[in-house]
Amino acid sequence: MGITRRDLLLLALLSASRAGAAKVRGEADARGFRLPDKQAVRIIENEWVTMRDGTRLSARLWLPAETARVPAPVVLEYIPYRKRDLYRSHDDLWGGTLAQYGIAYARVDVRGSGDSEGVLLDEYLAQELEDGLEVIAWLARQRWSNGSVGMRGISWGGINTLQIAALGPPELKAIMPMCCTDTRYTDDAHFIGGALGLTDLQWGVQFKAVMAMPPDPAVVGDDWRQQWRQRLEAAPPILEQWLSHQTNDAYWQRGSVSKDFSRIRCPVYIVDGWVDTYLNTVPRVLAHVEAPRKALVGPWAHNYPESASPGPSLDWAYEEVRWWKHWLAGVPTAIMDEPMLRAYMPYRTCSESYPQDTPGRWIAESRWPAPHIAGRTWYLQEGHLAEKPGPRGELRHAGDDIVGLTKPEWLPFPPGGIPSEQSPDDRKSLTFDTAPLAADLEILGHPIGRIRVAADQPVAKLALRLCEVDRDGKSWLVTYGLLNLTHRAGDEHPVPLNPGEAYDVRIDLSFIAHRFKAGNRVRLAVSESLWPLVWPSPRVAALTLTLDASSLELPVRPMSRDPFFPIPQNATAKGTPPGRTPLEEKGPDAQGWYEIEDDPQRVSYPVADTGTIVSGALGIKERLRIKRGDNNSCEWQGERSGGFERGAWNCRVYSAFRLTSTPDSFFIEETVRASEGGETIFERINRAAVKRELM
């Protein structure tokens, strides 16, 4: 049905499934822990879990054979991504892996998705979370359960894991969220630094399909058409809905656990990767959650550690079993005696080394924030970063060119989605370089830009890219940050700029670890926007920077000898999984038009055990256009389609979007169409004008 930006790529999942569970060490580690002996596993293909309102959720279970004699702890994964087909290979992999080591596994389709009854109307609604509480209680009271439940999940599954933990179900004893967010407005694919992100549309057109997919008649029976029609009729114009909430209002604050971390009282092990864009949650969880907590950040993208790309990947079963045995079964594994944060220190950017493993080493911090990491400041001078402020001066940046084509993706899936060499964008930006570094320089944390800036328009943005410039003059993106300057005092109540007035603003660039090499330069690149990462400002805006009042602070970590890294490397996942197809860029032509197109590869494959043929594509088909010097020439279009076929059951869902604007309004068009046996049974096109709110 197409691959959502929230998940692993389907073919990566399939290859991981074929490879089998990660190979893990059977011998004891340095602290005396060893994985339990493997046991047989019993799979229950479908189990109905009835909610208090009578709605039935569909669950698939993996039970250790020993539960007939000894109850087991159970780990829940709770997402809307179809356990029977789209996610089956992933579920088989992790259900079988955990259950063979004595940990039961439950995969439940969210209400209104997959084979669960009801309708799915939005992300993380109160109903979804209340259902999750009921599922956890149900799992805890089963005869084969010891009453202790854990939750794991990536992306959607990691986000609702945090949200459900914040509700405090007594049976939930520990969680492992991965690649997820605690702050929905800025950190979950909708608004980036207070600006509308392309990823909002990319994800929305795919989520539209998630809401509209049919249940499987082999599970739900003859009622499947009625249930499908109910879903199609109920699916809201989700892009208009999201676009109608352009500030961090109550709509986005619902489910943002960062508003009150104290509500999370069970142990947390949060996992992410440096190429992912959800990783800003990691330092916040470590700094603010008071319960026992750990984190691991690898070199990979939006992916699980065992099938990570870029590598190196890990034999993650070893670490998960240690975590769950410790907190759900009371087995001493010494996992909490180890550092709070383990992170991979890359010696090169992913863009330089891919598809090879990113060179680097594993580092560790006993607590976070780490007291030995200190900010080191460089000041902006014309063309330079210097260790002392220079004379008073100003530099002007005209925002009429298109900057951002080297960083088009908010959620980059290798190989096509990762940033390219940055020089083309650097030439259209203001750039500030250090002198060649005398020694290697390692950072861990948030680089901070403190910029005094004025704009000639009431709405403008400020984008900062931190790069490493090698001895050949090539520029490689390390991390970045962006701010809608009307959000300079916060995202709830934006305030227009007074044209010509200078403001002191702070931009925390995304959390990162990186080693800058001796002889290379650190570069800060400044522009008014990044396109197509975000929608352009209502009118072309020029920025003026006050140099002596502007600086870059890097979180410098002293070189140290780090402790032994105990998690084995996964030798079975060294191959390169498929990613999004590279974007095809054109322009500027003679009239100044830039255009980006993506027509992803189509895929069709059989689902093991069910006989279903799934068809779709590796991403969405999209066309993005803008004319230099005309911000409201911008147009974003995208579509996706896919289907399920097994005998007489032959269903397809198509969804599409188109977005344009004037300085005052957005114009959004979204389409959903469903067919059975080649005949259209449902179609809805929604068109809306939405007022721009300093956006």
Image (cartoon, helix red, strand yellow):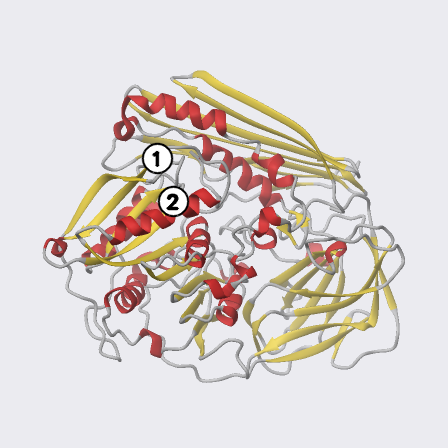
- In the image, residue 564 above or below residue 7: below
- In the image, residue 279 above or below residue 581: below
Q: Residue at x 67, y 66 (%)?
A: 473
Give the left or right position of residue 301, taking residue 81 as reference: right
Q: Nearer the viewer, residue 693 or 163?
A: 163
Q: Amino acid at mark 1?
A: Thr
Give the left or right position of residue 39, taking residue 571 as reference: left
**Would residue 219 be visible to someone looking at this image?**
yes
Q: Secondary structure at mark 1?
A: loop
| Callout count | 2
Q: How busy is the neighbourhood of tag 1: few (under 14 within 10 Å), some, or many (20 plus)?
A: some
For label 2, the residue is 131
Q: Nearer the viewer, residue 694 or 196?
A: 694
Q: Secondary structure at mark 2?
A: helix
Rendering coords of residue 418 (x, y %):
54, 53
Residues at marks 1 and 2 touching, judged by CB atoms closer than 8 Å: yes
Q: Give the spatial CA distance, label 1 vs label 2.
A: 10 Å
**Would residue 602 be visible to someone looking at this image?**
no
Residue 11, by quadrant, is top left
